[in-house]
Image (spheres, rainbow, N blue to C red):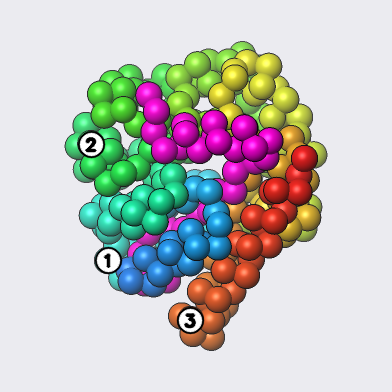
Amino acid sequence: MSTPLDQLFKKVRAENRAALIAYIPAGFPSKEGCKKAIAALAAAGVDAIEIGFPYSDPVMDGPTIQEAADISLRAGTNASDVFTALKTASDCGVASVVMTYWNPIQKYGVDKFAQSIADNGGSGVITPDLTIEESAQWLVATDKHQINPIYVVAPSSSDERIGKVTSKTGGFVYAASIMGVTGARTSVSVDARDLVSRVRSKTSLPVAVGLGVSTREQAREVAGYADGVIVGSAFIKLLLNATSEQAGLDAISVLAKELVAGVREGR
């Protein structure tokens, strides 16, 4: 399989740097605003974009992402808006994936969901609440449509569990850097570095760290040991707090450029 995501990690490895992956929920700050935010992030130099499928019962999302998801859901965002956002990102020339809980995939139709990801230029899907034991149907669908099934490991995952999960993962392994929910933090947990090295002992897949990065310094630090740095809450917070749509777009552009510089300084 060689999706834009796989090609991206080959490229950043050749350049001896980490990739910057930005997260934004579909339909946020509005359906059109989401497209503009994706274009702004791509223009600022992010390497990949992760589109969130807004969900009413998000077990892994912190208050910032939940607030954005609520705004999006109230505006009626549905699966088709998620795929439109995904296509917007892939049309901007960046590798793009969707992050979703399992319920929306099941509701949409497992095979149909995988096909829609591929049809809209997506490279894969991150499924934070789907266990390997319950993945048989999903793995058949992702294999058929040639997209990456991306799984999440946490500091609490045993080495045996990490081995089991990474053997079924494609694209990259999502390392959740702290126990708990998403959100920008003042420091990135020491567990992250340890988790990355534990994942590396089990697989040659790229490892991307998510949960908590919000500054150039943190991006630089994480890029020193991980293959990818995932940033979500920090961008969302700027959009939530902006006085106007344009002010929000300007703010995320500035932060994205800082983070792009940070990941390039990591090694």
Q: CA distance from mark 1 to mark 3?
A: 22 Å
| Alpha carbon distance from label 3 to label 2 | 34 Å
Q: Quick one: label 1, few (<14), some, or many (20+) residues within 10 Å?
A: few
Image location of residue 31, percent across then percent down? 32, 68
Residue at screen point 68% across, 62% down: 258
| Residue at left offset 56%, top offset 24% | 205
Q: Earlier in the sequence, mark 2 or mark 1?
A: 1
> As shown in the figure, which amino acid type bears the numbered disc 1?
Gly
The amino acid sitting under disc 3 is Gln
The answer to whether the residues at label 1 and label 3 have Cβ atoms under 8 Å apart is: no
Which tag is nearer the camera, tag 2 or tag 1?
2
**Tag 2 secondary structure:** helix
* Amino acid type, label 2: Gln
Residue bearing the label numbered 2: 115
Mark 1 or 3, nearer chain start: 1
Q: Is residue 25 magenta?
A: yes
Specify start and end residues of the magenta stretch as a single range.
Answer: 1-30
Residue assigned mark 3: 246
Report the residue that reaches farthest toward the bottom.
243
Q: Nearer the viewer, residue 34 or 256?
A: 256
Instruction: Give residue 3's quadrant in the image.
Output: top left
Residue 137 is one of the magenta-drawn residues = no
| Viewer-nearest of discs 1 and 3 | 3
Q: 246 or 235: which is nearer to us?
A: 246
Q: Quadrant of the N terminus?
A: top left
Cβ–Cβ under 8 Å for marks 2 and 1: no
